[in-house]
Amino acid sequence: MSDAIQGAIHDAVEAAHRAQSEFLAELVKVASDNPPGDCAPHAARAAELLEGLGFVVEHHRVPDDLVEANGMISVTNLVIRRRHGEGPVVALNSHGDVVPPGDGWTRDPYGAEIVDGQMYGRGVAVSKSDFATYAFALLALERAGVPLNGTLELHFTYDEEAGGEIGPKWLLDEGISKPDYALCAAFSYGVVTAHNGSLHLEVELRGKSAHAAMPHTGIDALEAANAILSAIYEHRKSYAAITSAVPGIQSPSVVVGLIEGGINTNVVPDLIRFRLDRRMIPEETGAKAERELRGVIDRAAAAFPDVRCSVRRILLAEPLRPVGEADRVAGIFRRHATRIMGEEVQTGGVPLYTDARHYSQAGIPTVLYGAGPHDILEANAHRADERLRLDDLRKATEVVALSLAELLG
């Protein structure tokens, strides 16, 4: 790539940075918490802003029955297509749904307040920021007059926090998009080609209630739950001996994050439910992890034959693994990011899971890269006072534009 093209891209990104920051602020100001998952209003506002930038926006409303089945209220996915001659199709995906703000904020979570060069707000880093990164990278390429051979698509979806089944996966399943490559939201100081998977199971234990004065007349579901939980925690110790070969990812894990049940203090509990989250490293599969964990639960439950034990899968998100040319594409982003960010940017994995996996599972080479700091802790992602350095937004936009120019050059 010539110095002239690189310089033109740099100038175009710089010239639009203020408008880009204002665009992001408007996205942060519109709530899109999931749950409850009423995200169509945010999509409408995002489309209005994108159309104001000159984009033609396709609105793809997900049918109500599918939305309800995925535990949400409304979803409209947005697609933008910019064709520049013959060549591959590159999809750039970011999600606009966010976790609820929670407590502990010192700034308005929907205020998009800028303090010391950082914008504060729920979703500003994960991942409304990459609506801005990707849209303004496309604009920079066009305003700089960069010759391209291929099509760039923006996929702005709204169900990542619920699993991505009616976001990227739905776009692919419905044939709305058939990309050759995919770029998905992440952070500026690492190029990601792999991430963990996640299995969510709900365990239900049914016994029989009884007065606490005569507990022998009941069947204590909590006693059985205690034994099963103890077995899970004992089994968890074995995960430390399993390590991933992917830099940035360590070992599998399991957490029991939710438990409910009982009637009153003086009643033998007849019903206990708990949910667990089993994280899988890229070397694992969901089927094997589920089979193993169900075995642990069944063996512990067998000691309580009078308690009915059932296990229900809530979510299965397979790990992201590199496919096809993912490593080559990652190398392009890593090289440009190292130069623009001013430090060595590595390729590796992350222990969380994203809806990028749906592109990879469809055989599409997929890389995660976008605006943000070194890791989710630095961004306060999913925590109070989530924030984004606007300088990282500007730099990431330049990296994306340069990388796309090389990929489609």
Image (cartoon, rainbow, N blue to C red):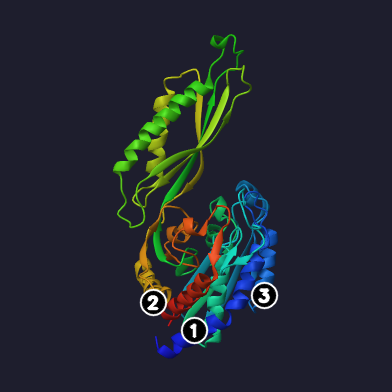
Instruction: Name the mark nearer the viewer: 2 or 3.
Output: 2
Tag 2 and tag 3, C-beta contact below 8 Å: no
> Could you tell me which secondary element the residue under label 2 belongs to?
helix
CA gap, disc 1 and disc 2: 14 Å
Query: Which one is nearer the viewer's eye here, 397 or 300?
Result: 397
User: Can residue 187 be seen here?
Assistant: yes
Question: In the displayed image of the protein, which residue is found farthest to the front?
Answer: 116
User: Can residue 155 be seen here?
Assistant: no
> Could you tell me which secondary element the residue under label 1 belongs to?
helix
Picture coordinates of residue 270, whole percent (x, y): 58, 21
Instruction: Name the mark nearer the viewer: 3 or 1.
Output: 1
**Mark 1 = which residue?**
9
Q: Quadrant of residue 390?
A: bottom right
Looking at the image, is 263 positioned above or below residue 130?
above
Picture coordinates of residue 379, whole percent (x, y): 51, 59
Looking at the image, is 192 positioned above or below residue 307?
below
**Mark 3 = which residue?**
51
For image coordinates 31% across by 48% down, the residue present is 243
**Mark 2 = which residue?**
339
Please name the amino acid that badge 1 sits on: Ile
Mark positioned earlier in the residue sequence (3 or 1):
1
Looking at the image, is 392 positioned above or below residue 309?
below
Please name the amino acid that badge 2 sits on: Arg
Question: In the displayed image of the protein, which residue is found farthest to the bottom?
Answer: 4
For image coordinates 34% across by 36% down, the residue present is 237
Picture coordinates of residue 39, whole percent (x, y): 66, 57
